[in-house]
Amino acid sequence: MRVLAIDPGYDRLGIAVLEKLVRKETVLFSSCVTTNKTHAQEKRLWYIGNEIGKIIKEWGPKMFAIESLFLFSNQKTVMRVAEARGVCLYEAARAGLAVYEYTPLQIKIAVTGYGRSDKRQVTEMVKKLVKLDERKKLDDEYDAIAVGLTCLASNKWNR
């Protein structure tokens, strides 16, 4: 089964495509979609949607996994991340993908076994769970891979 996994963001959005064959998870693609801070909000959201659409078309996932939104202290930030998340969900629905959402707690438990793991611990476990290329990755990219691993480890999609 192939999943497109998203760590939602507005300035930078983590994205990964993973596949599970029998019991082995493989990262087929991972990257970050970075929007131009000088562009208007609607252009940045369009860019995110356009990039998600291209990746869906190129990789042909059947499932879409995304981290659910958690509360930020900055209301402006939470609104922009929510809008970017909405664009991602729209693209998933437009492509007919099955959508699965996971809380940060669910992702940390699935990847590290501990719900209060920090970003460094999640990153280190992702490196141990799947083979990755040597290219330097941003935190958002590792987080997207963790979202994908959570989805593939979940029995939800088997039902």
Image: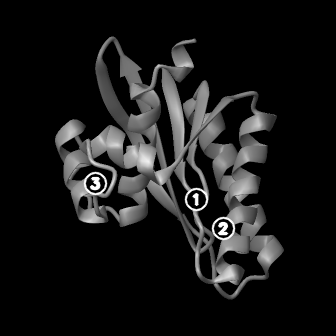
Neighbour tally class for label 3: few under 14, some 14-19, many 20 plus, Cα within 10 Å: many
Which residue is disc 3 drawn over? 122
Q: Nearer the viewer, residue 9 or 69?
A: 69
- Point out which mark residue 81 bears: 2
Q: Which dot, 3 or 1, sits closer to the camera?
A: 3
Q: What is the image's colouring?
A: one colour
Q: Residue flagged by tag 1: what amino acid is it?
A: Pro
Could you tell me residue 119's position as x and y percent?
31, 63
Q: CA distance from mark 3 to mark 1?
A: 16 Å
Q: Residues within 10 Å of mark 2 (few under 14, many from 20)?
A: many
Contact flag, marks 2 and 3 (Cβ < 8 Å): no
Residue 18 vs 158, above or below: the answer is: below
* Image location (x, y in percent) of residue 77: 65, 78
Q: Position of residue 137 (x, y in %)?
A: 32, 62
Q: Which residue is mark 1?
A: 8
Residue at left 58%, top 59%? 8
Marks 2 and 3 sit apart, C-alpha to C-alpha, by: 21 Å
Earlier residue among tags 1 and 2: 1
Quick check: marks 1 and 2 in contact, CB under 8 Å?
yes
Q: Earlier in the sequence, mark 2 or mark 3?
A: 2
